[in-house]
Amino acid sequence: MPKSNTTQYIIIGDDEFGTFVKAGQILPILNYEVGRMSILQAIDDPIRIEVYPDASNTASGNLYLDDGMSNQYLSGAQTLVTYTFNGTVLNVTKSIENGNYFKASNKMIDEIVILNVTACPTAVLNTWVNNTPEPAQGNVSALFVYLPSTLELHIIDLNIPVDDGLTYGQPQGLIQIIY
């Protein structure tokens, strides 16, 4: 729904739920397979990144990963990455200098959704190039669907690792939107 300073009334059906997100946020969401009954069953499923730009068309957010069961994070088995969006480019930066959670290099982003996109892009580039065995990455066209009725851009069929080959404090491009 577009941003507004006025009161908005939203009708939510019985089988739906409302989610309210502050403008300027990026939310990593577990993109679990149908039929999962618990978070532990879905823990290895891919991630969907949702971008909610603010009035200046920017957004940021974090993703923290560890095994969720032990205290191994105390000895560095963790990762924290920060996503930033400037209106056309989505970047990721490793935010923990000595974090080394090995499963983060296998955790994949398979979809990116950007809201409040006011025009259909001419192209979307997958700009991820770090140490990837994926031949379809690194300044190549990404598949996307633009929904003008809801101003959503869905970038699909991605296979971008959450934290593979990132250097602490150095931004790495993920997606570039071209108009």
Image (tube, grey):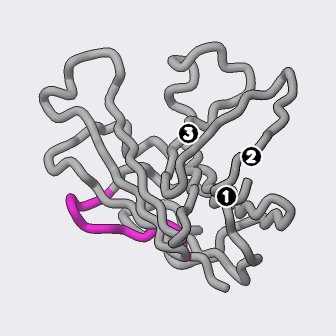
What amino acid is labelled 2 in the image? Gln
CA distance separating discs 2 and 3: 25 Å
Q: Residue at x 54, y 55 (%)?
A: 23
User: Is residue 16 among the parts visible in the rendering?
Assistant: yes
Dot 1 lies on which element? Answer: loop
Q: Residue at x 66, y 58 (%)?
A: 3
Q: Which label belongs to residue 90? A: none
Compared across the picture, whether 58 is left or right of 70 comes to right
What amino acid is labelled 1 in the image? Ser
Number of callouts in the render? 3
Q: Residues within 10 Å of mark 3 (few under 14, many from 20)?
A: some
Q: Which label belongs to residue 29? A: 3
64, above or below 168, in the image: above
Residues under numbered marks 2 and 1 in contact, where contact means CB atoms less than 8 Å apart: yes
Q: First in sequence, mark 2 or 3: give its number.
A: 2
Q: Nearer the viewer, mark 3 or mark 1?
A: 1
Q: Which label belongs to residue 8? A: 2
Dot 3 lies on which element? Answer: strand
Q: First in sequence, mark 3 or 1: give its number.
A: 1
Report which quarter residue 20 is drawn in: top right
15, above or below 53, in the image: above
Viewer-closest of 153 and 45? 153
Dot 2 lies on which element? Answer: loop
The percent coordinates of residue 152 (x first, y second) are: 73, 61
User: Is residue 127 among the parts visible in the rendering?
Assistant: no
Magenta stretch, residue numbers: 165-176
